[in-house]
Image (tube, rainbow, N blue to C red):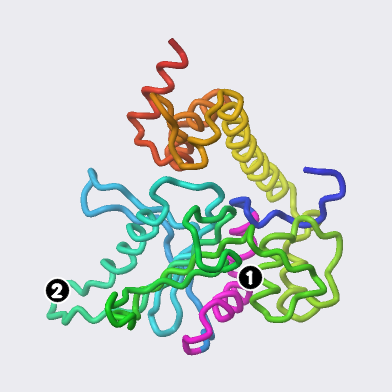
């Protein structure tokens, strides 16, 4: 950890689950969801659910959510951090949501297909590539819509994507609770004390739970491992970009693909392999299949 670092980085796997996924911190998750989904009836309580979901057969892929919970009305919430871009990031979000939909099927008696709401939150440490009418828009609420009338067709399936890097307000500019949560997501690990504007009951609890000095030995080691993985991943991506630029391929990167036999995904995979990442992490990082990653690994080792 960097000298003087007092609070955890919420984009590490350990940091995110420590603050939002522990029973003792349930109030933080509840407050966060209420801030994000103001149109919903106020969430009073949530129950954490199993985050690993197997397919219908041994051959089916499984889904592992970062956090998965439901409120008292039975509405499901999938909350995930996404540290790097993936080629099929939106597809992955939709695929994961189907697990929360299908598990609602009632077996053994008549069922009329009535579903409870499913909400997927993607907290992104990157920005979308698509051009937007408003480049400063960082919260994207997505539902099924009639494309002719622009009216919501189905309101029980909602995706919310937060482009955290776009949030640039200083601590003195924070006005709403939404602002405050985004500021914490982006800047918690950079702070050395609780800002005056964040000194309320909910955020004081967050800062207490996020203070590294209060961790026991096991927690500290787990966080250090998680932080190393986070930084190694960032380093691998940056190295791949720099190497691509050096080879005159920057234009291809900007378009999300490279000319000839190279591709952005292949370049990142090559660097990640050399950095010592295993195939599963590289598949998540690049969107490549296990067989494609294994082929790249063989080419490097040959």
Callout 1: 10 Å neighbours few (<14), some, many (20+)?
A: few
**Can you give x and y, in whole percent of width and height, for residue 292 in the image?**
35, 29
Residue carrying label 1: 24
Residue at (48, 86) in percent of width and height = 39
Which mark is first along the chain, 2 or 1? 1
Residue carrying label 2: 108
For the image shown, how many numbered marks are present on the structure? 2
Magenta-drawn segment: 15-41
**Can you give x and y, in whole percent of width and height, for residue 187 in the image?**
74, 60
In-front residue for pair 113/273:
273
Q: Which numbered tag is attached to residue 232?
A: none
Question: Could you say whether the residue bearing mark 2 is in a helix, strand or loop?
Answer: loop
Residue 40 located within the stretch drawn in magenta: yes
Callout 2: 10 Å neighbours few (<14), some, many (20+)?
A: few
Residue 175, picture quadrant: bottom right
Q: Is residue 210 above or below residue 114?
A: above
Question: Could you say whether the residue bearing mark 1 is in a helix, strand or loop?
Answer: helix
Residue 36, picture quadrant: bottom right
Residue 112 located within the stretch drawn in magenta: no
């Amino acid at each position: 950890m960097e000298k003087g670092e007092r609070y955890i980085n919420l984009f590490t796997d350990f940091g995110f689950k420590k603050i939002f996924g522990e029973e003792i911190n349930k109030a933080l998750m509840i407050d966060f969801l209420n801030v994000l989904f103001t149109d919903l009836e106020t969430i009073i309580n949530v129950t954490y659910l199993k985050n690993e979901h197997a397919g219908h057969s041994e051959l089916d892929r499984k889904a592992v959510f970062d956090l998965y919970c439901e409120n008292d009305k039975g509405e499901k919430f999938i909350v995930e951090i996404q540290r790097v871009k993936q080629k099929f990031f939106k597809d992955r979000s939709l695929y994961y949501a189907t697990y929360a939909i299908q598990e609602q099927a009632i077996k053994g008696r008549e069922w009329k297909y009535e579903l409870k709401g499913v909400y997927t939150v993607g907290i992104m440490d990157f920005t979308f590539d698509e051009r937007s009418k408003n480049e400063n828009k960082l919260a994207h609420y997505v539902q099924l819509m009639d494309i002719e009338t622009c009216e919501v067709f189905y309101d029980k399936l909602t995706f919310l994507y937060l482009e955290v890097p776009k949030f640039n307000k200083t601590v003195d500019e924070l006005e709403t609770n939404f602002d405050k949560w985004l500021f914490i997501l982006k800047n918690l690990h950079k702070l050395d004390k609780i800002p005056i504007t964040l000194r309320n009951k909910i955020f004081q609890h967050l800062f207490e739970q996020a203070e590294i000095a209060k961790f026991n030995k096991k927690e500290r080691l787990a966080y250090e491992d998680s932080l190393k993985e986070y930084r190694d991943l960032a380093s691998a991506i940056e190295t791949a970009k720099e190497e691509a630029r050096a080879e005159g391929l920057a234009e291809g990167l900007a378009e999300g693909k490279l000319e000839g036999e190279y591709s952005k995904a292949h370049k990142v995979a090559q660097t990640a392999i050399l950095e010592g990442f295993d195939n599963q992490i590289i598949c998540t990082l690049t969107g490549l299949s296990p067989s494609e990653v294994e082929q790249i690994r063989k080419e490097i080792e040959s």
